[in-house]
Image: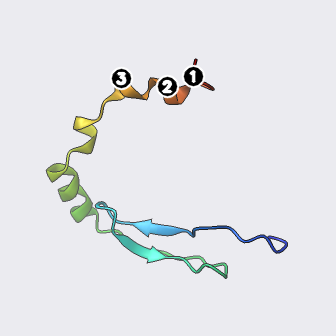
Amino acid sequence: MTNGIQFWGQSFVAGPQGEVLHLASPDKEENVVVEIDRTRTETVRRIWPFFRDRRIDAYNDITKRYLL
């Protein structure tokens, strides 16, 4: 699998406000299906309009290989 290498962190599924809905096992493989409440997700998007408030003009530098 990883030949003895251990990695920090583990996979997870998060809800629309960042809450952890499922945290995967740190030491075994697993496949999980997590149900997402699409109505709640839409409600959160309406009361916390992240996409409306983002500053796309501030993203230019992350598309460059290096900064001068």
Residue 54 x, y percent position in the rendering: 29, 35
Residues under labels 2 and 1: Cα distance?
A: 7 Å
Amino acid type for the residue under numbered disc 1: Leu
Q: Which residue is drawn at 72% across and 71% down?
A: 6
Residue 48 x, y percent position in the rendering: 19, 50
Q: In this view, does 33 lie above or below 50?
A: below
Residue, far right: 3
**Residue located beneath label 1 in the image:** 67
Which-is-in-front pick, marks 2 and 1?
1
Q: Residue at x 58, y 17 (%)?
A: 68
Secondary element at tag 1: loop
Image quadrant in which you'd find residue 17: bottom left
Local packing at callout 1 (Cα closer than 10 Å; few below 14, some 14-19, many 20+) is few
Q: Is residue 68 above or below residue 35?
A: above
Q: Which of marks 2 and 1 is nearer the N terminus?
A: 2
Local packing at callout 2 (Cα closer than 10 Å; few below 14, some 14-19, many 20+) is few
> Does any portion of residue 35 appear in the rendered image?
no
Local packing at callout 3 (Cα closer than 10 Å; few below 14, some 14-19, many 20+) is few
In the figure, is residue 54 to the left or right of 46? right
Residue 24 x, y percent position in the rendering: 54, 77
Secondary element at tag 3: helix
Q: Residue at x 26, y 60 (%)?
A: 41
- Pointers 3 and 1 in contact (CB under 8 A)? no
The disc at residue 57 is 3
The disc at residue 61 is 2
Secondary element at tag 2: helix
Amino acid type for the residue under numbered disc 3: Asp
Image quadrant containing the N terminus = bottom right
